[in-house]
Image (tube, grey):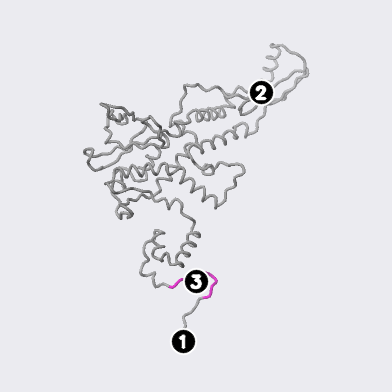
Amino acid sequence: MGSAGGDSPLPGVVPPPVPASQDVSVETALSMSAVYRSVDILCTSVSQLELGVWRGISELKNVPAVVARPDVNLSLSSFLKRTVMSLAGNGNAYWRLLKDDAGAPVQNIEVLNPSSIVIGYEDGKKVYHYSGYTKPVTFQAWEIKHLKLMEVFGSDYGLGPIQAVRVELRGALEMRKYADNWFTEGSIPTGVLAAKDYIDGEQADEYRKRWEANQAKRGVAVLGNGMTYSPILLSPADAQFLENQAFTITQIARLFGIPANYLLAEINGNAMTYQNMEQVDTAFLKYTLTAYLREIEEAFTDVLPRGQRARFKVQGFLRADDRTRADVHEKYKNMGVLTTEEIRISEGWGPMPDELKNMKPTPAPGMPVQEESTEDNG
């Protein structure tokens, strides 16, 4: 083996060429653990958020059914997961709006398979050809709400992470395949038999056959005529190309906007603490999740009556730990900014029950119990 040079994972080891015609589908990309986990994090993060509806600056107490349960056949969580999955995997999400006509209120919303949608034009009007049912269907523009992850100028379609970097993902898939087949189908020999003097091809074949026959039975190796054997050994890390796999995970995390530590990927020189973990969560919400949240919020707002708008309540995603929240609540209570009732409601506990209002606080373990004085202070 000669030196391969370049970006070869190991000196003298060159991965096989990849056919230029080979493409990477959403399903193929999801077979990579880092891609699957990245999409799962996005879906889970959005699906756990609560949706509210506002009119002006006032939040509606009763969320309209089209937002509370967009698809009567699915939970809101499942509906949001399908939408985010479509955006993250395909760059596009398509909602079928079930209503009587263009001006009628929406009765139900169905998330369509984005891979089965082809956008076309009939008489200058945009239509959506869908092949996801038993028979192909053509929907008019007012029947479809089209959500795009990234707008591409001059294109009717949005652009998703997988479609944007197919070449990089294809290379990562080929590297994984190459590592998996290293020991079974690789062309790298297990060792080298070297003679001190020159031997011709016939002698070389004879030595090799004898060596393989002997080692097949795990017998004692006997070498002569200046013959030496040098095994080709790889460490477990080199054999599985762990360094390259770690780099691939970092690339995929960057592609989907997922913090590397969410994928358990280690970044050299970056020690995570609780404080900067909170900063990472905030940055993830601000620079990654917002792209999905805003698109979904605007889509819901478009199907609501005029003057109403839908918004995600993201405070729960950035919820601090119990001790931090307790300190903040105590601070605001002492300042007169919050009452006990308001604190309970913010924690999701509701108003304080009557039986608890007159209950005396229980002293902490080890603290003396203060008895009430019976003396007349008058």
Asked whether the beta carbons under mark 3 and mark 1 sit within 8 Å of each other, the answer is no
- As drawn, 364 above or below 324: below
- Say which amino acid is labelled 2: Ser
Q: Earlier in the sequence, mark 2 or mark 3?
A: 2
Residue 375 marker: 1
Judged from the image, the secondary structure of the residue bearing numbered disc 2 is: loop
- Per the rendered image, the range of residues in magenta is 360-368
Local crowd size for mark 2, using a 10 Å CA cut-off: few (<14), some (14–19), many (≥20): few
Image quarter of residue 75: top left
Residue that label 3 marks:
363
- Say which amino acid is labelled 1: Glu
Residue located at (43% from left, 45% from top): 45
Assess whether residue 362 is covered by the magenta stretch: yes
The location of residue 138, given as percent across then percent down, is 27, 29
Judged from the image, the secondary structure of the residue bearing numbered disc 3 is: loop
The location of residue 183, given as percent across then percent down, is 59, 27
The location of residue 91, given as percent across then percent down, is 40, 34
Q: Nearer the viewer, mark 3 or mark 1?
A: 1
What is the CA distance from the residue labelled 3 to the residue labelled 1? Answer: 23 Å
Dominant secondary structure of the magenta stretch? loop
The location of residue 308, given as percent across then percent down, is 30, 49
Assess whether residue 202 is covered by the magenta stretch: no
Q: Nearer the viewer, mark 2 or mark 3?
A: 2
Q: Earlier in the sequence, mark 3 or mark 1?
A: 3
Q: Earlier in the sequence, mark 2 or mark 1?
A: 2
Residue located at (56% from left, 41% from top): 265
Residue that label 2 marks:
3
Please identify the quadrant where the N terminus is shown: top right
- Say which amino acid is labelled 3: Pro
